[in-house]
Amino acid sequence: TRLVGLSAASGVGASDDPQAEQLRTAPEVISTNLTFPYVEGMAFASALRSELGQAGIDAAFRDPPDSTEQILYPERYLDRRDRPAQIELTPPHARWCRSPAQTLGMLDLRVLLRSFAGGDSAAEGWDGDRFALWEIEGAEPLLAWVTVWDWVGQARRFERAYTRALRNKRGDDRFAVVRQDDVVSVIEGAEPSDALFWATGLLESRITRDPR
């Protein structure tokens, strides 16, 4: 499997390997995550070795990167540790059940934007995110998502790009994207007025930023 991932990422021998062909034709989110350790991971390890030698690689095993952003941009691990903001999502209404919260991360955010917004430049400036599903019997599950950005301008750019992405992705108006300064919240799957109400409430999520 490792060789298939590496050959698919590099294009070497891919045409002769049915597994590599399956990887090439898989959805981008799958192929990107499968090849990420071999392509970007290898580049990250090379940057550590170039900067700090083998000791730097050994140290990274003891203190691994906090995010895919740090692997995509090794200087954000090496020069000034750019740790993502910690987000505690505002809970849903008492009648709703919430799934365990998860993080999308810069890598998968890039894939999401490429798939539905026509490009991934709006992922630049990502400083953390957290999402969860809200569920109640008899209704479509809602996706609740909070993203934090390095600068207000980057948050504004993401707000525009993701609004466009949701129109393309869903084909309806059952969502809301709301920004307050450098925080953007999203609700998917609710009527517009409800989505706006709940997305605005998500802006009250507790956010702890890494001091820089």
Image: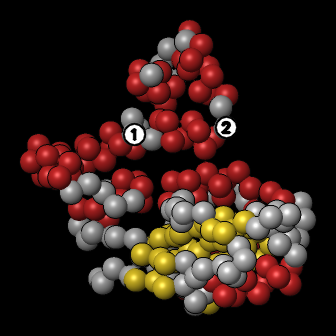
In percent of the image, x 11 and y 43: which residue is there? 54
- In the image, residue 113 lies at what x, y percent? 66, 58
- In the image, residue 182 lies at what x, y percent? 55, 85
In percent of the image, x 86 and y 84: which residue is there? 193
Instruction: Tell me which corner region of the image, top left, top right, bottom left or bottom right, holds residue 144.
Output: bottom right
Task: Quote the CA–CA distance across marks 2 and 1.
Answer: 17 Å
Q: Amino acid at mark 1?
A: Pro
Q: Closest to the observer: 199 or 60?
A: 199
Instruction: Tell me which corner region of the image, top left, top right, bottom left or bottom right, holds residue 119.
Output: bottom right
- In the image, residue 25 lies at what x, y percent? 67, 28
Q: Closest to the observer: 140 or 80?
A: 140
Q: Quadrant of the N terminus?
A: top left
- Asked if 181 appears above or below 174 in the picture, the reply is below
- Asked if 24 appears above or below 61 in the picture, the reply is above
In percent of the image, x 57 and y 36: which residue is there? 31
Residue at mark 2: 27
In this image, 107 relative to 136: left or right?
left
Give the farthest residue toward the top: 16
Q: How is the image coloured?
A: secondary structure
Query: Helix, strand or loop at disc 1?
Result: loop
Query: Helix, strand or loop at disc 2?
Result: loop
In percent of the image, x 69 and y 82: which residue is there? 93
Going from the N terminus, do you reach mark 2 or mark 1 first?
Answer: 2
In this image, 149 relative to 37: left or right?
right
Instruction: Tell me which corner region of the image, top left, top right, bottom left or bottom right, holds residue 23.
Output: top right
Residue at mark 1: 37
Label 1, residues with CA under 10 Å away: few <14, some 14-19, many ≥20: some
Circle number at residue 29:
none
Label 2, residues with CA under 10 Å away: few <14, some 14-19, many ≥20: few
Q: Quadrant of the C terminus?
A: bottom left
Q: Amino acid at mark 2?
A: Pro
Say whether residue 44 is visible.
Answer: yes
